[in-house]
Image: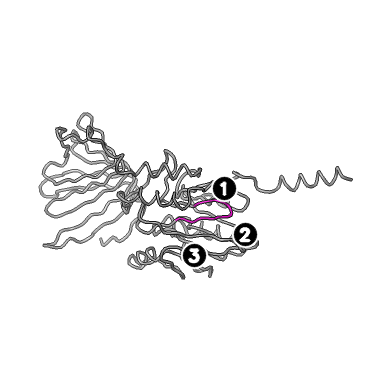
Amino acid sequence: MKKKILAFVILVTLQLPLLGQKIEISEDLTLTKISDHTYIHTQKNNNGIVYFSGKEAIIVSTPDSDTATQNLINWVENKAKIVAYVIDRWHPDAMQGLDVVNENNIKTYVNKRTKLIAQQKGLPTTQSTFQTKKTIKVGGKKVVCHYLGEAHTTDGIVVWIPSEKILFGGNGIRNHNGWVGNIGDANLQEWSNTAVKIKEHYGLAKIVVPGHGKHGSSALIDYTIELYDSSRKVSKKETSKNEKMINPLQDKDISVESEFETTKNGKKILTNAKVTIQDKVKLITIASPKIELQENKMRIDAATGRVQIYARKGDFIILRTDVYFNKLIVFNYDETVELVVILKEIVTASNSQE
């Protein structure tokens, strides 16, 4: 009799999701179990979390799709009541599905800065807001939403689950040697300082979940601090005044901000950079993890990032185009056409007035 009971217990245990196990919710949406009560939801390499406590649950960040967001809600509601949905930043990979969340009558929370940006951009908004810190009860357990400063965006927050010692760092925390992403809305000067504050509050986290890529330990916080520490940026040797300034667009004014630069054979490669180009009629800003100034080809290349194109009208500068891309090329054409911007694989378009 005892042997039969033991066999039954083992069978039931094996049927439960194991830590690290991936659950396919749909073709492009997966869940990864990282603790007894917490899952990472991932779509297109974009992460969020789901936390269960008793018969209640909370979700942080929406997938980058209405359909995937509804699929996620359906899966969670089959197991528990969703008492809160938290949006951690204003970018589409964190709030694209917010309309769907609202349609499901789920209570939503967001930092006041995020709501202001959303209103300015005509994006959907949430019901409840908080200035700096908000504690939400889920099944009697605490979940803490905390704004600690500007980083990947001016509004991004982290979410802390004390009972699990799990921190969702959002895009303010980078994964080891992996995804870098667009920095078009980033504050590169403050990013490291904000990560230091995150470490001061949540450095004892056992698991840290970045907005993109693989989760890890609190070492991801240290990695982010070092990655954006201004004291570690381009050395004097690499930015010697004797080094020739490469400007592939000749008569155009170019300014460059980057974390690291290398020059070889008429090509300057910029890492985590922002390049601003100006002529008489346009002002163009390009933000990308990698930008190449190719003097030998008389052009600028960027892979993955954001470009903003402004038109000059007298003393006014008007935003004409604001898009995310997977590939960009800028070059001079002739005196009539001036600058040509070629975009391949536009990812997200916003605020476009053309």
| Quarter of the C terminus within the rendering | bottom left
What residue type is disc 3 on? Val
Q: Position of residue 48 (x, y in %)?
A: 50, 53
Inter-mark Cα distance, 3 to 1: 22 Å
User: Residue 32 got which mark?
Assistant: 1
For residue 335, side relative to residue 1 (left or right): left
Residue at image mark 2: 53
In which quadrant of the rendered view does residue 58 lie?
bottom right
The type of colouring in the image is: one colour
For residue 74, side relative to residue 305 (left or right): right
* Sequence order check, earlier mark of 1 and 2: 1
Inter-mark Cα distance, 3 to 2: 23 Å
| Residue in the foreground of this view, choosing between 322 and 21 | 21
What residue type is disc 1 on? Thr
| Residue at 41% over, 59% down | 147
The secondary structure type at the circle numbered 2 is strand
| Quarter of the N terminus within the rendering | top right
Q: Position of residue 85 (x, y in %)?
A: 51, 63
Q: Nearer the viewer, mark 3 or mark 1?
A: 1
Task: Tell me the crowding category of disc 3: few under 14, some 14 to 19, or many 20 or more residues within 10 angstroms, Cα based.
Answer: many
Q: Nearer the viewer, mark 3 or mark 2?
A: 2
Residue at image mark 3: 100
What residue type is disc 2 on? Ser
Q: Residue furthest right?
A: 1
The secondary structure that dominates the magenta segment is strand
| Residue at 51% over, 69% down | 103
Task: Tell me the crowding category of disc 1: few under 14, some 14 to 19, or many 20 or more residues within 10 angstroms, Cα based.
Answer: many
Please give the range of residues in magenta. Answer: 158-167
Q: Nearer the viewer, mark 1 or mark 2?
A: 2
Indicate whether 117 appears above or below 288.
Answer: below
Q: Position of residue 4 (x, y in %)?
A: 85, 45
* Sequence order check, earlier mark of 3 and 1: 1
